[in-house]
Image: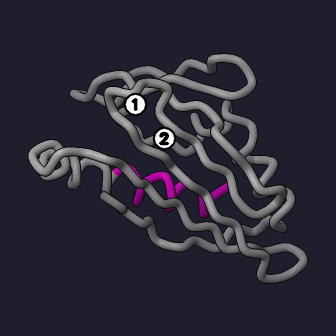
Amino acid sequence: MNISGNQVTVNKNAKDAFEFLSQVANFEQLMPENIDKFEVLGDNGFIFALSGMPEIALEKKSQELHHKIVLGAKSDKLPFTLTGTIDEVSFDQCNVNLEFSGDFNPMMAMMIKGPITKFIETLSENLGHI
């Protein structure tokens, strides 16, 4: 299952946007209002929970300097990645696209598609305000 958020224009250059997304603590600023928990787990990971949803732990899996950062689930129970792709537009602007990719059975995919889509849209929207 792949869900792509809306591409947003960020008023930062690609380097600054990449550095923002590379610091996992900054994801707290991007979270929806209905967040129940956010806890940083060292330099490379965090755990969060939204109202009515289970806790999810994410960690950095890979990165391409100033262009892409990939976060993935720490648990094999919910195998997915969240990829941020950054494309520089000008000296002080870049476009960022967030994409969720997960390997779920059809029943699970049907249940989580709506909430995950809304979550990715919220992260993207909030990213446009950094």
Q: Distance between the residues labelled 2 and 1?
A: 7 Å
- The residue tagged 1 is 35
Instruction: Give 17 or 64, whichever is nearer the viewer.
Output: 64
Q: In the image, what residue type sits under mark 2? A: Met
The residue shown at (46%, 71%) is 6
Q: In this view, does 98 lie above or below 63?
A: below
Question: Helix, strand or loop at disc 1?
Answer: strand
Q: In the image, what residue type sits under mark 1? A: Ile
Residue that extends furthest to the left in the rendered view of this protein: 107
Name the image quarter holding residue 49.
top left
Q: Is residue 24 left or right of residue 115?
A: right
The residue shown at (79%, 76%) is 88
Question: Helix, strand or loop at disc 2?
Answer: loop
Residue that extends furthest to the right in the rendered view of this protein: 91
Start and end of the magenta stretch? 119-130
Instruction: Give 50 or 109, whichever is nearer the viewer.
Output: 109
The residue shown at (36%, 22%) is 55
Identify the image quadrant of the N terminus.
bottom left
Q: Is residue 103 above or below residue 84?
A: above
Q: Residue 31 carries which label?
A: 2
Residue 37 in percent (x, y) is at 44, 20
Magenta segment, prevailing SS (helix, strand or loop):
helix
Residue 124 in the magenta stretch? The answer is yes
Q: In this view, does 54 lie above or below 67?
A: above
Q: Do the residues labelled 2 and 1 touch (CB within 8 Å)?
A: yes
Name the image quarter holding residue 43.
top right
Residue that extends furthest to the bottom in the rendered view of this protein: 89
The residue shown at (48%, 41%) is 31
Mark 1, Cα crowd under 10 Å, few <14 / some 14-19 / many 20+, is some
Q: In this view, does 121 lie to the left or right of 16?
A: left
